[in-house]
Image (cartoon, rainbow, N blue to C red):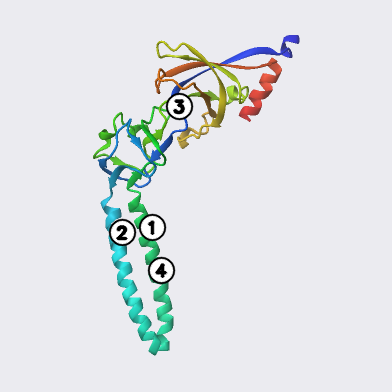
Amino acid sequence: MGSFIVPLPRRITATGVVDFADAATVYVRVPGRVESMLVEHGDRVAEGQALLRLKNFDLERQHVRLVSQSAEADLQAATLRRRALSDASLMEQWDSRVAAVTTLHQRASYAASQVEQLVLRSPCDGMVLPVLPCVVRNDAFASNEARHLTELCGQHLDAGCRCCRIGDPKHLEVVLQVDAQQRADIELGTVVHIHFAQAGIGVIESTVDAISEIRQEDQADRVIRQREFRIVCSLPRTERLMPGTEVNAKLSTSPQSIHQRLINAWRANF
């Protein structure tokens, strides 16, 4: 009975990958076919610089049509306004026409913003980095990732697809995945010993910098899948570590009795 309440040391094991830290992901916001790729992985870019151009004929035709309709509606409204100055009975008709013209301008402005988003631009200064296979399973964007950006030319990309990332290639982190029961014992600052599959690295000690719940993309099995969490640990700046390297980690948690662990596990799941 005493062993049930005596605090016992415990280590949690987890797997993950080395990833780029704080890199900004470039997403496709408007679907289209890749017309031209303007950069490649490893290129230095400035904030606002064009990265690739998409082509969406339907969207561009819609924009041209709305601009034309807006210009024609402006002329009709101006003509009606001149007539209404001498015929007060036309004022109500003119008010309705002005409302319609305003709506057309709004639609044309929105279409223009959509067309502008066919050019993907860098959100910040940095280097063009690849999108690595994610530690999270069932990655909804995995099918649109490419080893070389030139491979995307001619492909159709849906809204939400990841194109690349922009960041510092020497600023790395380890991303681990744990379930809800393990999460109950992990806190910010928890010591982590990371073993790298990459030869010549060995074991590096780090700490837990961030913990976030992983949003499940697969709605169909959300009910039966337990909650999962992403654990982020910082790494020293080095050119030896390779992003995408798989790791095994051991997290040193605070000593807890069996009784307390059962309580935490229950709270994490319910």
* Image coordinates for residue 230, horizontal then vertical, percent: 52, 28
Picture quadrant of residue 48: top left
Quadrant in which the N terminus is drawn: top right
Q: Which residue is mark 2?
A: 63
State which tag comes first along the sequence, 2 or 4.
2
Relative to 210, does residue 101 appear above or below in the rendering? Answer: below
What mark, if any, has residue 171 been given in the picture?
A: 3
Could you tell me how far apart the alpha carbons at marks 2 and 4 are, in whole angstroms?
16 Å
| In-image side of 175 versus 198 (left or right) | right
Q: Which residue is mark 4?
A: 102
Q: Report the front residue among 27 and 31.
A: 27
State which tag comes first along the sequence, 3 or 1.
1
Could you tell me how far apart the alpha carbons at marks 2 and 1 are, in whole angstroms?
9 Å
Crowd rating for badge 2 (residues with CA inside 10 Å; few <14, some 14–19, many 20+): many
**SS category of the residue bearing label 2:** helix
Picture quadrant of residue 245: top left
* Image coordinates for residue 260, horizontal then vertical, percent: 70, 20
Q: Which residue is mark 1?
A: 110
State which tag comes first along the sequence, 2 or 1.
2
What mark, if any, has residue 245 been given in the picture?
A: none
The amino acid on which the numbered mark 4 sits, given as a three-letter code, is: Thr
* Image coordinates for residue 103, horizontal then vertical, percent: 40, 66
Identify the residue at the far right of this view.
Answer: 2
Q: Report the front residue among 6 and 19.
A: 19
**SS category of the residue bearing label 3:** loop
